[in-house]
Image (tube, helix red, strand yellow):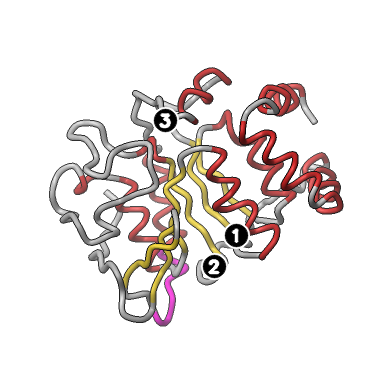
């Protein structure tokens, strides 16, 4: 474990996420924890070779991609998207150019569950624990700051999720203090993704289109799941801006 990751883990132990991860993941599943840490130490942690979408796949989108001016109608530091819920028109500002909306709609066509990521504590309860205990998720595409990469790769290795981590280009957290503020919902900057990264992401999601695509989303806790039956929400699909 490198010094940066060790420092992150040590500083997080007094936080709800760190103590929860220690108790509910490491101590509750010691064999999985040891194996995951060994994979991470060997540089074999959670590398996603091919994205297939469908059941067991997750697309996680950082809440900090939500627009600021005009502001997201669902609010900022939460798991919601009103377009996904059929309560707001995708062609209206600020939803028209919102990457959360656009990436989520592409993920729907790929048959993937969509998760607007907020705090590490919620990621633990909504993604990591269900993956570890129930094998709910086996693959993921996650947008996040590079500062979070190593802690997330370790957690994913332990929870047996193969993932591709997609870095923000601008507005991302560069140290623990900034990360901690964002983790509690204090994130005045809007993050951005590189255009080349967006093109690759679009191609990846489009390549995983399903034979029987979902008709919309159904809300399951903090997650938006693809629904092939009568849908709670039916957002019209569109390309990434």
Above or below — where is 170 with respect to 143? above
Label 3 or label 1, whichever comes before in sequence order:
1
Task: Write the residue at 63% across / 62% down.
Answer: 138
What main secondary structure does the magenta stretch of the protein show? Answer: loop
Above or below — where is 145 with respect to 212? above
The answer to whether marks 3 and 1 mark residues whose Cβ atoms lie closer than 8 Å is no
Q: Which residues are magenta?
A: 206-212
Mark 3 element type? loop
| x and y, in percent, of residue 70 in the image | 17, 34
Decide: few, some or many residues near mark 3? Use Cα within 10 Å; few <14, some 14-19, many ≥20: some
The answer to whether marks 2 and 1 mark residues whose Cβ atoms lie closer than 8 Å is yes
Q: Which mark is residue 52?
A: 2
Query: Does the segment drawn in magenta span residue 209?
Result: yes
Mark 3, residue position? 185
Mark 1, residue position? 139
Decide: few, some or many residues near mark 2? Use Cα within 10 Å; few <14, some 14-19, many ≥20: some
């Amino acid at each position: 474990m490198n010094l940066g990751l060790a420092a992150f883990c040590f500083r997080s132990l007094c936080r709800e996420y760190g103590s929860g991860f220690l108790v509910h993941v490491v101590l509750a599943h010691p064999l999985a924890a040891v194996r995951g840490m060994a994979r991470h130490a060997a540089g074999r942690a959670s590398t996603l070779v091919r994205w297939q979408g469908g059941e067991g796949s997750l697309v996680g989108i950082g809440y900090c991609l939500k627009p600021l001016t005009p502001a997201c109608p669902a609010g900022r530091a939460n798991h919601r998207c009103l377009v996904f819920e059929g309560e707001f028109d995708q062609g209206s500002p600020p939803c028209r150019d919102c990457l959360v909306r656009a990436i989520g709609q592409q993920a729907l066509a790929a048959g993937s569950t969509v998760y607007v990521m907020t705090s590490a504590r919620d990621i633990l309860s909504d993604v990591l624990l269900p993956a570890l205990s129930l094998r709910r998720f086996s693959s993921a595409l996650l947008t996040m700051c590079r500062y979070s990469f190593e802690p997330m790769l370790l957690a994913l290795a332990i929870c047996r999720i193969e993932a591709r981590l997609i870095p923000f280009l601008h507005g991302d957290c560069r140290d623990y203090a900034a990360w901690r503020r964002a983790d509690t919902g204090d994130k005045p900057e809007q993050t951005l993704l590189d255009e080349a990264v967006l093109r690759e992401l679009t191609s990846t999601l489009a390549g995983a289109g399903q034979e029987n695509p979902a008709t919309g989303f159904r809300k399951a806790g903090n997650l938006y799941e693809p629904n092939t039956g009568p849908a709670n929400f039916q957002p019209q699909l569109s390309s990434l801006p």
